Structure formats: structure tokens, C-alpha cells
Amino acid sequence: MEAFVYIIYNSAIFLLSPLLVLYFFSRSWQRGRSLVGMAERLGRVRHLPPAKAGGRLWLHAVSVGEVGVAAILVPEILKRCPHLRIVISTVTDTGREEAMKIDGVEYVFYLPFDFPFSVRSALERICPTAMAIVETELWPNLVWHAARRGLPVCIVNGRLSENSFRGYLRVRPLFFSVLGKLVGVAARGEADAIRYRALGASGVFAAGNVKFDVPAAHVVDDPEHLKEKFGLGGADPIIVAGSTHPGEEEALARAICTLRERFGRLGVLVAPRHLPRLADAEEALRRGGVDPVRWSELKDKTAVGQEGGQVVLLDTMGQLGEAYECATVAFIGGSIVPHGGQNPIEAARWGVPVIFGRHMQNFSEVAGGLIEVGGAFRVERPEDLAEAFLPLLSDTSARTAAGASAWKSVMANRGAAGRVADYLVEMLKTSRNDQNA
């Protein structure tokens, strides 16, 4: 059965490869992405010497969110195994840029297309001892060919939403074959673990969500200076809307117009999830009745915005985590449109109350936990945003209590990074023992 699935999958890949490559070029062109990494995507990655002393771990982190998990795990792993070499593959340009900032990483490269020849080439050149896939992204040839080389492959911080689970069930023979090659899955929570087991994965356990282990928030000595950094000097209160998606900026703009009637110095920072759609986000905000200014045009002009009431469009990656510290209240994007939501932990760790829509499937356990303790609030419709913001912006005691609850929820769930690091180090040790036997 497995051989049949392998033949069918690769036959489909072969027949569709011209369309897949054309689609990649088209998407790259539309989003203004570079094609510099095309050789790597075809498996022509750098030749690395065998890592004999501590081995080499290949971490795959598709984009910025997954790279954030890798950034938390890498120092934890190296604490336990200082001679280990770690390489990271990504799919997106922004993910690659963030991965290159992680200390202790030997090499960062683009994941090869899931063609047999490109996967084999990358494995031969990287010479990994083991492989860990962050969160969800499963590429059949990558897993199959790694397993054929005797490499242990696992998933860490495994995420499998109900929608994704139903989709995988439709092609269960394929994913049953792929998941059956894994040595284990360190899932974010028990609900994710149950779904992985139902698809045929073994060695599944709930390790907790590594994203809770983002370095503890620090309180800045000069909060007003931080507000000025983001063009919000003099603003009070402040809404930070993070990782917004199409359809959300216009809804936010309408809420801002309503709230300005009550809060004349309201400042807002809007951070679109994908930078290539900045122009679209800007236009959507204008259609909703506000006139935004891009942060790149302000960051060296701290005097701008002193009158308050500024709406700033964050047009640089890597700044949102810090920007949440400015927030009186945070809005989490990808949630009032059916995307599945973005990470609310980034805001909650600062003790900031969180608002999101009803589409939080990708972070259902985190969102549910925050709602349960009173640290987050869900809106059912886009037109309800202003009403949801109003009590938190106007009632200091309610806002303080909600923010404290959000912070406590984050602190109570820390520790997954250490458990996952222990698991990976043990997997590497077992792998080296098997290879030396």
C-alpha cells in the first residue's frame, strides 16, 4: 500500500510540476519576492561537512510564526547539547530573514520543492542526524526520504486544527503513510494530540505550546519613548492591531471612527500579516474613514504624532512583539475573517487585554484559556469591534484586571520549550547510538 501511495503521489507531482513551478513564480512576482533562493528550492543547498561531535538537527519552520518557535527552542536545545549543529529551512522570505537572526544556527536555507531529486540532494548536502518539523507542514517526499536514510523525523509544537484534520481525512492514505514514518509528535495540546493519533501518528504526546515560552516581557524605563518610537507619542489610549488580514482593516477603521468620538487622542498601530499587501491595507483603512501613515516614514521623526490620534501602519517585520507593549488593548488579526487567527500570546505576555473574532481555530486552546480567565474577549461580528473595545479603553480597573489575567495565563503555561528540548536531545542521542551500532 505504501509503495502504491508513493507512486501515485510522485506521479501527480511529476504531472503537476510545470504548473506548480509556474504558480511559485507567479506568486513570487505578485508579492515582490526574490528568486535568489531558486537553486536551494531545487535542492542545491550548501555542502556541509558531517557533524561528528554532536550531530546535526534540521529544523523546518515554514514562516515567521514557526521561526518564532525555533528561536525559543534553539537556545534550550544548545543548553543541553552545546556541540550540536542546527540548520533551519523556511519557505518564505520573511521566515528566512527572521531565522538568520537566531544565534547558534549553522545555516539557513529555503526548503526544497517536494520533488524526489531535490529532497535527496538537500539531504545529501546537509547531512542531518535528525529532523524536526515545527507545527504542521508535512511534505511527503521530505519525510519518506529522510526515513529511508534512517533519520528520525518528528513534529514539534504540533498543531492540527479541526478544519485541517477534516481535510487530511479526505486523503488519509497519503498522510497515514507520512505520519507513520515519524518517530513522534510533541503536540501543543491534548486536542491536537488526539487528532494526530487519529491520522495514524505514533509516539504522540501533549508537550504544551512552546510559544508561551517567548522570553519574559520586560517593562521599559521610559514608556513614552517607546510610544514615540512607533509614532504614537502623546496618544492615549492606544490600540495595537496585529497580523491583520484582508477584510479586517476596513472593519478596524470603522471602529476607530466610532471610538474617536469618545477618545480624541486615540492612537492606533495596524500591522498587516503580510507586507506585500501594505498598499491594500492602507487603501482599506482610507475607505473606512481614517488616514494612516507608514511607520517607515515616521521612525526617525519622534516628534510626529505628539498631538495624538495617529493611525500608524507598521510596514516592517520583527517589530510587532515590542509594539504590543505600547497597547492599552490589542486586537489579534486573522480572526474576524475565516483565517483561523494569529498568536494572542505576543500581546498577552505584556499584560495587555486581548480582543479577537470568532475564527481562532489555529489557537483555539490558547484563545479559550484566555477567555476563561477573563484576559481576552471574543466578538462575533466585525461591526461589534467598537463596542468590544469601549469598556476596556474607558474603565481602568477592568482593563488592569483583564491584563493581569492575560499575563497570569501566559506564565502558568510556560515550560513546553524545556520539555520539547529534552525530547529532541533524547531523539538525537538514540539516533547517534543507532548509527554507531
Image (cartoon, rainbow, N blue to C red):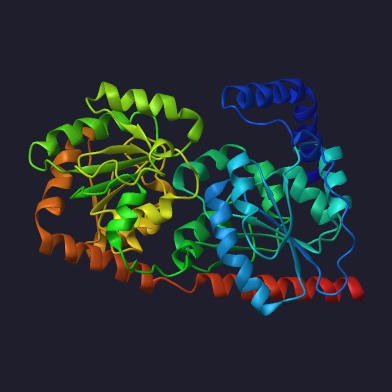
Residue 295 vs residue 282, the one in the foreground = 295
In the image, residue 221 above or below residue 339: below
User: Which residue is painted at 20% across and 43% down in the image?
Assistant: 308
User: Which residue is painted at 62% across and 42% down in the image?
Assistant: 172
User: Which residue is painted at 30% across and 55% down in the image?
Assistant: 326
Residue 316 vs residue 305, the one in the foreground = 305
Instruction: Name which quarter of the figure residue 92 lies in.
Output: top right
In the image, residue 273 above or below residue 277: below
Residue 382 at x, y = what percent? Answer: 24, 34
Left or right: where does residue 286 sit relative to residue 33? left
Quadrant where the C terminus is found in the figure: bottom right
Residue 278 at x, y = what percent? Answer: 44, 30
In the image, residue 136 above or below residue 275: below
Left or right: where does residue 399 sit relative to residue 261? right
Numbered circles on residues, count: 0
Residue 328 at x, y = what percent? Answer: 23, 54
Quadrant where the N terminus is found in the figure: top right
Q: Can residue 135 be seen by looking at this rendering?
A: no
Residue 31 at x, y = what percent? Answer: 57, 27
Residue 308 vs residue 380, the one in the foreground = 308
Q: Can residue 201 be seen by looking at this rendering?
A: yes
Left or right: where does residue 151 sit relative to residue 375? right
In the image, residue 338 above or below residue 136: above
Q: Residue furthest bottom?
A: 80
